[in-house]
Each structure stands twice: as structure tokens, then as C-alpha cells.
Image (cartoon, rainbow, N blue to C red):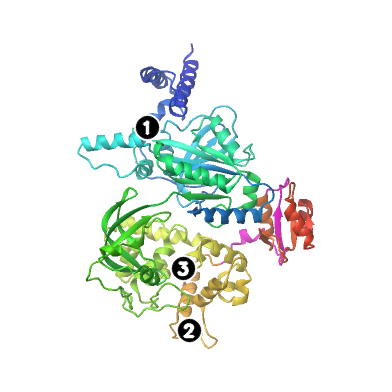
Amino acid sequence: MAPQEKITQLRNQLRDHNYKYYVLDTPSISDFEFDVKLKELQALEEKHPEYYDANSPTLRVGGEITKNFETVAHEFRMYSLDNSYSKEDLEDWETRIKKMVDGEVQYTCELKYDGASISLRYENGNFIKAVTRGDGFQGDDVTANVKTIKSVPLQLKGDYPSKFEIRGEIVLPFEGFHKMNEARLEAGEEPYRNPRNTAAGSLKLQDSGEVAKRPLECLLYSLKGNDIPTTTQMENLEIANNMGFKVPQIAKLVSSIDEVLAFINHWDIYRHELPYETDGVVIKVNNLQQQEELGYTAKAPRWAMAYKFKAEQVATILEEITYQVGRTGAITPVANLEPVELAGTTVKRASLHNADQIEKLDIRVGDTVFVEKGGEIIPKIIAVDFDKRPLSSKITQYITHCPDCKRQLVRNEGDAKHYCPNEEGCPTQIIGRIQHFISRKAMDIEGLGGETVALLVTNNLVTTYADLYDLKADQLLPLDRMAQKSAENVIAGVAASCSIAFERVLFALGIRFVGETVAKKLSKHFKSIDALMNATFEELIAVDEIGDRIAESVIAFFAISEAQDLFTQDNSPGIENRKIIERLRENGIQLEISAEKLAGQTTILAGNIFVVSGVFTQVSRTELKKLIEDNGGKVSSSISTKTTYVVAGDNMGPSKREKAEGLNIPIISENEFLVMLV
């Protein structure tokens, strides 16, 4: 047999045996026989490097060193999931769904595996790239490490789309986790704390050879692509399974919330018999067309919900209450606890939220408190064991002055939190605002971290984020751990941020209540910082999803009286913020939507509100909605008296049609809509 032919044969045999062993759990040859074939293939590949294949089974042993994990953008955003904890939560979710889509709604129930989220990219059946969740928009390229995980197919079986991504979890089974810890204890090393953190940490090891030694597995459950040949989530699971992915078999199609709850109640008991960590159930609308119609909020799909199993609780002693100052001046009380093990981690601190929560639970220093770690990352105190309260305990008196700058705190009517009003003089607020400004989702200034920002403020080199653009490398050199190259990188990173798009600049300014999504809506509507600064309350609330609270916050940020101008000596926050904006403008920061983005936008549809329903043939539903917004219109998810048009595709829901006709709202076709843009 010719060498190339033998190499191909061995690769195919090893892939098949690998699939049977790690995915199907039905090995057809012994480990010894597998190793013999693997060594034979390695020898042939070394002798014939001209037949190199990046996805050869021999490369699973690792050995590649990654010093820096490259940041990669997700082609399809990786959203988080909204959490629910009760039957009522799920019923409310179902009610919202049935208001937005027509017809029968079925759900898939899948276990929520507690691992490290991953997105795998395939082209023409070959594994191309593995990227961590990151912030949902971009993550770290961990391809070399994931390639060593035996349950990840490097070449697909059967029929598959030419290009797609598949999402899942990298998990560490209990059996493998315990074996790893036994080996560490024998070597005199500290054991790993829990499977989830160990799995996540494995993905960022620099030596893929070390990753290959860990018994990681990859469980896949979500296909993403433009030509996936399925119409339901259950079909997605089936096609993924047929392609060779390790798809969890514990998935069930149901038709009611009662059936969902039956699935939840069953696995809340029997999950402890599973080989992996699980912390809940993910419920998804099964029909992919209905998923598309439901769409997404800023953070999560409307068509999916995570039900979290009852959170673990422990009791410990509250040793001290301290207070943190946020970048907006908000004061957060923190419980400092006697260290206690909870959900696989050592908990020393817990959130107390605000003064009302402390008063409601009557929390006092010295109390024995019950701590819970549920859907939140930060544990919380849920109750006090009054039977164990010391006789000497005293009622908690909430602080009256800022723990940082000592300014007297204020609390606005209807607001749960206290605030430090010293925006320009409170060091923690100053540092927090600049740290927010440089963060990844904002200006993404490379080379400049939170600790360096604190040093810059402490050494009086900056007091606002506009000061960053006046820094010189020689000013940075006296700072701790700052060498010439590091200083030059900071200056270069600051300069590069001048190209950041206006919507992210607006988010970076740190206006209270203006998060990423709100910043996008405001930038798209007003198109420049000048238009936004001069917007009235009425103009602001006219923007889709902008309410009174956001509008008032924006106005307060830029507030200036008729008697004032930028050249007065008045030090009001509005005047100072406008001065900072002018300095940013002088340094070339993008304070308006670029001409390139504006090029495809018009006001043809201004004043019109559209509801989109059904399946379209010339453009996708997402493209159609973008066309509406790019041409000045608004998209609504439900029909009301304010709706101008309903754009109807194939399979439009009968209830939507009936409601539109009842309100005399014009129903137009896809072609009729496209003609409106000409």
C-alpha cells in the first residue's frame, strides 16, 4: 500500500475508534491496539511530512505552546440566559412568548451543564477554531488546547453544512476530577477546588500537552450558521449527533410548562447520578422560526430560559460590614464573613445590596447568617439565625458619609441606594470612571489596566479620562512596574482608541443608566454627541425604549443653565462634562457616527412603526429589521394602535393577522416593503 494511502487509512480508522470510545462509549479495540496504530501513523507522518494534516489524530497529544491567546470576534454573538427559580417565573415567560408568536409552542428541555462555554467553528467538515465565550462579542482563541479533547471531532461524519459554529460546554467529569486530585495529593500539591473552574482553567494553559493529559470532555447543544438544514432545536441536536459531536442524550420535547416542571423535578433528584456537574435545566422554544420571531433582549434570547436548581446555602458569622464606592458614587454595603465553603469555592464576602435590605433582614455584626449562591456570581445573605444572636449585638447604623472622601451621602426619593455627590473629588469615583472608560466594551485601551489607572490618579497624572490623551511616556516611567516598552504601549493604546466608534465612546463616558444597548440606541438616533447634549426630555423619551429615568440622567450629565457657558468658572458637573467632551474632541475621539455608517441610512421610514411576522424569501427577518431601522423606522414586537404597518411573510400567525385587521393596520408583503425604500 502506498504511504499516502496507508496514512489516510490509519487516520480514518483512528478517528472512527476515537468516536466510538469517547462519544459513543462503545470501544471496538483495546487501548493497546489503538496506541499501536497511533504510533504507526506518527512514524509515517514523520517520514512523509508532505502529507501533513492539521486535524490528524496524532496532533491530539498536544505540545503546542501558546503564550498569548488571540482575541477573536464571534460571527454569531454568544448570549447569556435569563434565569428562573419557580413555576411562576416559567409561566410568566410562557405568557410573554404566546403574546409574541402564533400557534402551538413546544419546548425542548436540556440539562444545564456547569462547565466552560465554548464555540467551535467548522468549514467543509474540518475543525477550524475554538473560541471562549469572552464577553459574548469576542473571546479567546483556544484552538490548540481544545484540539486535544478527544470528544471534539476534528473531521465530521456524514452530511454537514459547509460552514457553521456549534456551541457547548467543556466539562471535567467527576471521575476524572477525583483522579486528578488524588495525583495532586500524592505529589504534595493542593487539590483543585471544583470541576468547573478546573475545566475553565485548563483552556488557558499555555502548554497544550498539559491539557491533553486532562480528561476533559466537550458536550455540544447549539448549532449556528446561515444554512443549517433544520427547523427545530430537536433536529439540531439530532444532526449534531449524526455529524459526530458528543450531544447529551438527556433532552426532551414537551408541550406545556407542567411537562417542563416534571422534567425539572425529575432531574433535580437524579442529577446527582450523572457523571458531570449540572446546575439547572435550559428550556428553549423548539421551533426555530418562532425563535427568530421572538428575537433577543440586550443580553439574552427571549426564546430560552434557564431554570436553576435550588441554590446551596451555608451558615457562617458576619464579622464586619464595610462600604464600597462605585464609579457613579453608589454606595454598596458588603458583608465580610468568616470564610466558609459554598458551591465549591471559599466565600469570604457577600453583598448586602442597600440600607433597606439590611433593615429588612435586621442584619447585625456578629450574627450567624445564611449565605446563598444562586444565579448571581456574588453570594448574598438571605436570612439571620436569630436564635444564635449575641446578647451584645447592636442595630446596624448605615453610614452617613462617604468612606473615601468623607462627603455626606445623599439618597434620592424612590432610590434604594445612597450616593456620594462628590463626583469630581472622590478618588474612588474618579478611578472607577476612568477604569470604565478604558474597559474592553468601551474604549478598549490596550496596555492600560485598572491598577495602572489607580496609580495614575494617585500620582496626580490624571483626574479625568480626557487627561489620558495628554500623557507622555516619560511621565509613566516612575510608576511601579512601568518600563520603557510598557509606557510606550500605554501611549500607543491611548492613541489607537481614537478610532473607536461613537456608540462605544458614548458608553465609555459613564452616563448613569446608559449601558451598551442604550448607548447604541442613542447614538443611532441622535448621530452625534452635540445633538445628544442639546436634546430635550421630550426628544429623549421619544427614542425607542428610552424612559424617564434614562432621559433625566442624560440631561443631568450635560446640564447647563442659560446663564452659563463653557468659559464660566462654574464647576457644576454638566459644565465639567462638557469641557471634557471638548477635550476629547480636540484629541480626535469619534463623537459622531462615521460617514461610512451614515452612507446606507435614510429617513424614508421616519415616523413609521413596523411589526415583522412570518418567513421571508428575499431578505432574512434580521436583515429586514435592519432595513427598517437604517431608514429611520422603528421595529416593534407586538401590534398595537401605534403600529403603522405589518410586514407579512409566509406563515404569518393568524392571531397577528386578525389583530392587525381588527385595528385596520395595513398588512404589506415583503415586495411592497422593499418598494417603499426605492
The residue at which mark 3 appears reads as 510
Residue 364 x, y percent position in the rendering: 29, 68
Numbered label attached to residue 567: 2
Labelled pair 3, 1 in contact (Cβ < 8 Å): no
Circle 1 is placed at which residue position? 62
Residue 246 falls within the magenta-colored stretch: no
597 drawn magenta: yes
SS label for mark 3:
loop
Going 26% across and 73% down the picture, which residue do you hit? 394
Task: Give the mark, 3 or 2, whose residue is nearer the N terminus.
Answer: 3
Label 2: few (<14), some or many (≥20) within 10 Å?
Answer: few
The kind of residue on which mark 2 rests is Phe
- Give the mark nearer the N terminus: 3 vs 1: 1
Q: What stretch is highlighted in magenta?
A: 592-620
Instruction: Tell whether 330 sits left or right of 9.
Output: left
**Percent coordinates x, y for residue 107 in the rendering:** 59, 44
Mark 1 vs mark 2: in front: 1
Q: Quick check: marks 3 and 2 in contact, CB under 8 Å?
A: no
Q: Where is 598 relative to 121, above or below? A: below
Quadrant for the C terminus in the image: bottom right
Compare marks 1 and 2 and give the one earlier in the sequence: 1
* Residue at the far top in the pictured view: 1
* Structural crowding at the residue carrying mark 1, measured as other residues with C-alpha within 10 Å and reported as few (<14), some (14–19) or many (≥20): many
